[in-house]
Amino acid sequence: MKNVRPDLGVSFLLLFLSLTVTVSSSFARETSGYGHYAPSAYSNKVVLLDWNTPDGLSRLVHASYTTDFYQLAHHYQPQQNGLYCGVASSVIVLNALRAGRREIPSQQTQEISVPPIWGGGSIPYTLYAQASFFDEHTEQVKPRAVVEFRANAADGKPNPGLMLQELRDMLEAHGVDARAQYADADEMAGVVLFREVLRATLGESEHFLIVNYDSQKIGQAGGGHISPLGAYDSASDSVLILDVSGQFNPWVWTPVRDLYLAMHTQDGAKYRGWVVVSEGSTPLTNTGHPE
């Protein structure tokens, strides 16, 4: 059989595709395993530290701002599907705010019906649940079908999940005070402001902090993501993310600067950022100018 020399252009194309696959596969390998991370896009090194390693636990023990961790950890739950990071984060915070105050109505979809032979009625479930998060109030913010990729938004385009403002509005639909801050300041001023918010929020029990960031930028699997924060360690200038994507990532410590820059990424026409959540009874200072 006669040997045929391939066209030079085809050879270059094959080489390019081979390199592309190699680079993509390399990143996938670094982030595909649970608790395995790629280098941060901002530090060019792996900056994440699993919370349950000896170093991670030591950091938690010695951190000065850990009040929120002990409230949120009790109510932590991973997101039920790939689009529910905002829903799971909201449910965790709502339960941390209200569970001990007997202010949560029974979630009818979670109740257990008792057979008549056992007296009838139902067993109530007085905690917020992801399955019952959506109601007539949240539907006015964003329909559940749009969030879950089962319908398009009003403009006819898909818009799954929750953006920062939608997260804020969903929380307010549940009757709490939610103040969003976009990470659209310059890096130096933005990091300083965010660090002030961490100190003001994570060291007291009336406010909670949820962040919207690009998880891939700090070396995690995924992309645009939402999770609550549990603690701030000033010695290492790092913050503990109570990551709700339990199928991909454990809780991790990340440098404040890297997390801020991962929030300083665009989601649609606006930047990502954070939401401070409370019952609205106690004002929180040093949180910038909320949207």
Image: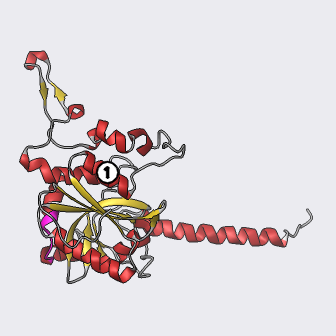
In percent of width and height, residue 148 lies at 42, 43
For residue 102, side relative to residue 95 (left or right) = left
- Give the residue at mark 1: 169
Judge whether residue 174 is colored magenta.
Answer: no
Residue 289 relative to residue 73: left or right: right
Instruction: Identify which amino acid the numbered label 1 is placed on.
Output: Asp
Residue 217 appears in which quarter of the rendering?
Answer: bottom left
Does 206 appear above or below 257? above
- 269, 93: nearer the viewer: 269
Q: Is residue 61 above or below residue 278?
A: below
Looking at the image, residue 31 sits to the left or right of residue 55; the answer is right
* Quarter of the figure with residue 25: bottom right
**What kind of element bears circle 1?**
helix
User: Which quarter of the rendered picture does the N terminus lie within?
Assistant: bottom right
The image shows residue 175 at horizontal and vertical percentages of 21, 47
Which span is picked out in magenta? 63-69
> Measuring 39% from the left and 64% from the top, which residue is drawn there?
272
Measured as percent of width and height from the top left, residue 135 is found at 29, 37
**Residue 237 % position (x, y):** 25, 81
Classed neighbour count for the residue bearing mark 1: other residues with Cα under 10 Å, few (<14), some (14–19), many (≥20): many
